[in-house]
Amino acid sequence: MRKALFLLLAVVSLASLVACNDYETYGDKKEKERKAIREFLADSSFVVISESQFHQQGDVTDVAKRQFVYMDNSGVYMQIVHQGCGKPLQDGENSDLLVRFVEVGLIDSSAIYNDVNPYDVDIMNVKRQGNSFTASFNTGGSWYVYHSNTETVPQGLIVPLPYLNMGRPRTADDQIAKVRLIVPHTQGHIIASQNVYPYYYEITFQRKTDL
């Protein structure tokens, strides 16, 4: 699955890199970003639905139909693979989450991940106040090391949190929360922001400790 994904992204990346002048304007870079996202969606046969349709469906995406919802306020494309078990984060709650991720650049095909070794997991501290979520990564995790020693969680990675349950599996049928995201540079980390690069993610979340 991952080999096929990386091969697809490499093709998208080659298609997205065009000859340019010595100087690219911000507008040029944004158009390249939009093109990379369009081609990735098309080549992956993903179907984009509106946020209103997403809410009409009960805040879920139909994975069998390869649906991604376009989130109007952020510009993030999101697919909820599993909503997760347990309960959502509650108003006023401060919780540590175990986070495993795959991150792939849609333009340069760079890839990092922490989902192979079961002991290689990032810890994200999340606080909820009303409908607002804030988060930071633990300094000892892969994200901190890979992303220039920063604890900051990009806004794009916070987008799914209101729609997920953050429990720990208790039965064989329980599944932890899993999402796929396409995050534009405006909602991404510092490398994405500086280079006007979009990134694709596969992420799982679960509480660090059971309730």
Image: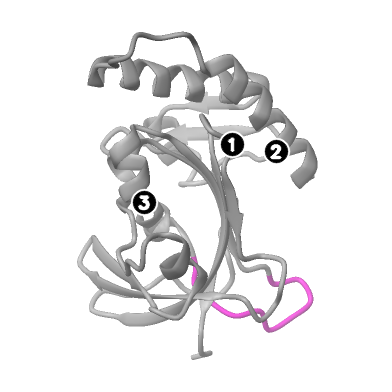
Q: Residue at x 76, y 71 (%)?
A: 173
Numbered circles on residues, count: 3
Does residue 173 appear left or right of residue 59 in this picture? right
Which segment did they paint magenta? 165-174
User: Disc 3 or disc 2, which is closer to the eye?
Assistant: 2
Q: Residue at x 49, y 11 (%)?
A: 18
Q: Nearer the viewer, residue 40 or 18?
A: 18
Q: Amino acid at mark 2?
A: Phe
Residue 83: x and y in percent read: 56, 59
Residue 187: x and y in percent read: 31, 44
Q: Which residue is mark 3?
A: 159
Disc 3 to disc 2, how far (Cα)? 24 Å
Q: Are marks 2 and 1 in contact (CB under 8 Å)?
A: yes
Q: Nearer the viewer, residue 180 or 11?
A: 11
Q: Are marks 1 and 3 in contact (CB under 8 Å)?
A: no
Residue pushed farthest front? 22
What mark, if any, has residue 109 been given in the picture? 1
